[in-house]
Amino acid sequence: MLTYDMNTRGKMPRYQFLYQCIRNDILQGVIRSDEKLPSKRALARHLHLSVVTVENAYHLLEIEGYIYAKERSGYFAERLQHRPAPPPPRPQYVKEPEEREFFADFSSNKVEHSLFPNSVLTKLFREVLSAQDQNMLKTVPYNGTAALRYAIANYLINYRGMQVDPGQVIIGCGTEYLYGRLLECFAHGGVLGLEDPGNHKFAKIAERIHLPVRYLPLDKDGVSIRALRDSDVSVLHLSPANIFPTGRLIPIKRRLEILNWLYENEDRYLIEDDFDCEFNTYGTSTQSIYSSDYQDRTIYLNSFSKSMLPSLRVAYMILPRTLLKRYRDEISFYSCTVSSLQQTVLAHFIERGHFERHLSHVNNVLKARKTALLREVRHAGLHHLGTIRIPLAGTAIFLENLTLPASAEIAKRNAEQLDVRLAFVADYMQCPTEEAKKTLILNYASVSQERFPEALRRVRTAITYPRLPMP
Amino acid sequence: MLTYDMNTRGKMPRYQFLYQCIRNDILQGVIRSDEKLPSKRALARHLHLSVVTVENAYHLLEIEGYIYAKERSGYFAERLQHRPAPPPPRPQYVKEPEEREFFADFSSNKVEHSLFPNSVLTKLFREVLSAQDQNMLKTVPYNGTAALRYAIANYLINYRGMQVDPGQVIIGCGTEYLYGRLLECFAHGGVLGLEDPGNHKFAKIAERIHLPVRYLPLDKDGVSIRALRDSDVSVLHLSPANIFPTGRLIPIKRRLEILNWLYENEDRYLIEDDFDCEFNTYGTSTQSIYSSDYQDRTIYLNSFSKSMLPSLRVAYMILPRTLLKRYRDEISFYSCTVSSLQQTVLAHFIERGHFERHLSHVNNVLKARKTALLREVRHAGLHHLGTIRIPLAGTAIFLENLTLPASAEIAKRNAEQLDVRLAFVADYMQCPTEEAKKTLILNYASVSQERFPEALRRVRTAITYPRLPMP
């Protein structure tokens, strides 16, 4: 008769423990193929269990095909390939490499999160949750909730002077995500053009769907028109208000040349990545290319990762009318990726003016910080080592034409030893130029002001020593 | 002298309005290339503005490249290609087709959201928000927050008897999303095998990254081993505890055959989609294939869309140790797609036992509903039209071998006219069989009990009339 020690079952229900014991015995051949199992009643008596417990265990074994019933003769073990039980693997924690936190990270474009109006957002979450709106429980439409799409459209109309209809807005869980979906629209025969330097993540995303990528060099006014015309690019990615990572902007002359290129072929599209447009020292009023494009061929892309918080995971894009149908037909089978709760809260945050107030506050802080940074750069004598360039857009200043005793790589390694992270423009290039290897980026978005004196002393050490001894 | 009516500027700041007026005049050639602009002082006097306002407008025009300064002679219009101003497009609402709500949707697998413990979740949100945890503001690791990964691992260990390490868990904004990322791991040389019938969305996702797809027919025990062996499939998708949409389960004999196939080649992997495992009438204790796979070649996939709410947008997968490094190397550059707030709340919800209580409540409701449905099916005489099959898994019953006066398509169209949505098994097949065209699915997850009598009367009409007259 089958004998199991029911006391070793821990918190497991009796029927499940019994089921497991018999299952393992069948799998290991302890109970042989076609062997008859004891009757429910007999086994219950033998193991001091209720008949219902054995019944439940047998039922489960039958459902899963370990045993079969023959009318009026009881249960039998299935004919299975027996196998020795493998030793149960020990649960062993798989260690993730931890994200290192630096004393000062001048490579990061993330705004320090202490500037985030957490209490306002908390209040809005509470309010939305209290309302117990049944709509919040419903499935979100593929393009996002109407409330958030209206809020974003209104924001862009009022603060960016853009003509946007809420039906053109697509909400997603981050720029990368939306970018991937958008590129799927161009996967058949399209060729993506990226600025070099630029954000290389986009190239990786394009490669996944086999969309060819061309890197286009920049001159001082942005993407080179000659290189663009010499290429087979059909979809051009631009960040015209803040060329990544140099902080330059594309002047109107070049923009008009780009629009001319765009209109020459109706398969051509622009992707306008306006990722940092909220942060600049000339106000929030520069015109988007989207607004100048009267043939409706520009996709406008932006996110709340920097303007709000990276941990929120909300971004949006504005599709031109010419692309809406294609997107709906080909891509809308993907469900929306942001929870309705989060979308509702964000819609309130924007509509009640909190977003604008927050941006204005952050811009004031960043402006003061920039002034402080420039002062400390001079105080640390960095201006003797290269030329300071202060772009109008974004949250970085640049040290150009640096005379480095060793390479940019060694300067960065030196800095890491001093708990500071640095980046050069060359780090964002597919084909790095000599000039870019000598251009240091000092992004002050995530470094708090009181750390500047010490941080810049360390930067100085890092870029003037040939190579620091290993600690 | 430039003359603009400043009263028409609405709420726009003066400098911005002036900037726009001049910008448009330059673009349209009203101000010609290289034409000199009035001095700031003169224009300010002429328009009754402060000099600072004109200064700001000129500054912006200069930054954007509409005008250039010559030392000691003032500002001049850039040489631009002039173009007639296009008529401003009228903002016109792009209408989205609305999701139709039916009196009864027997095709939907979504659990009615009135069953969701909204108040518990609200309380948890409040608690987490009140704690003002700074960690919540930080960037989420690519695989999700540690708290949620631990909670899910513990849940699977305790309730599914699975050996899971939190380091194996990957959090994402839905099954589709995770599926897409996962398939990228197999994009080089892999071939995806899907059950037919099955969830065809997965085929679409695979196509996007050019991963070939093969449809494998099923017999009564699940995927046909012969078809599997005759194919070049390397990655096999299964829902062994609840074959979609038939609700059958794969018995142990077939599972062992599948594992044998798996172990014959070390490039082979299984994707176990356990999408509905929480809902069945035999308890929550059936073994996952993941647990039987001692060679660590199974990816376990599940979501909270049905077990909690579709609008939450959280799913997870458990990667086998053999795949972890590849995933980390190739896919971890994508940011995590679920907000840290949501992950923290969900972690609490699971850890404090709310998830388990919720599932148990829903299962009780669904069990009662199933009984009621069967009663009403008989009451409506549907059992005379076909054979009732009641699977153990999932939330549907089936009417097999239906005698339809016309086609399944017409039965569905009839139903829609009566505000009821129906689906047949054939709707989920790449190669529909005659049998599948005669198998009606009655999924009761989203239809509330009090509607059963009326809903089933309409179903009867829909499937017995040749074709209802259009309304």
Image (tube, coloured by chain):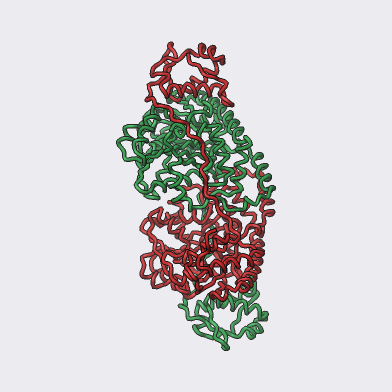
Chain colours: A green, B red
Q: Is residue A336 above or below residue B404?
A: above
Is A89 or A394 nearer to us in this picture?
A394
Q: Residue furthest left?
A: A230
Is A356 or A89 nearer to us in this picture?
A356
Quarter of the image where the N terminus of chain A is located: bottom right
x, y (%) of residue B467? 50, 65
Left or right of B258, for residue B396: right
Left or right of B375, for residue B170: left
Asked if residue A43 can be seen in this view, the reply is yes
Residue that appears at 42% across and 48% down = A184
Q: Quadrant of residue B460?
A: bottom right
Asked if residue A427 can be seen in this view, the reply is no
Q: Is residue B294 above or below residue A393?
A: below
Q: Quadrant of residue B106?
A: bottom right
Residue that appears at 39% across and 31% down = A222
Residue that appears at 38% across and 36% down = A196
Q: Is residue A44 above or below residue B439?
A: below
Q: Quadrant of residue B47?
A: top right
Q: Residue furthest bottom?
A: A72
Q: Is residue B97 above or below residue A34?
A: above
x, y (%) of residue B408? 48, 67
x, y (%) of residue B15? 54, 21
Is A98 or B377 nearer to us in this picture?
B377
x, y (%) of residue A9? 63, 72
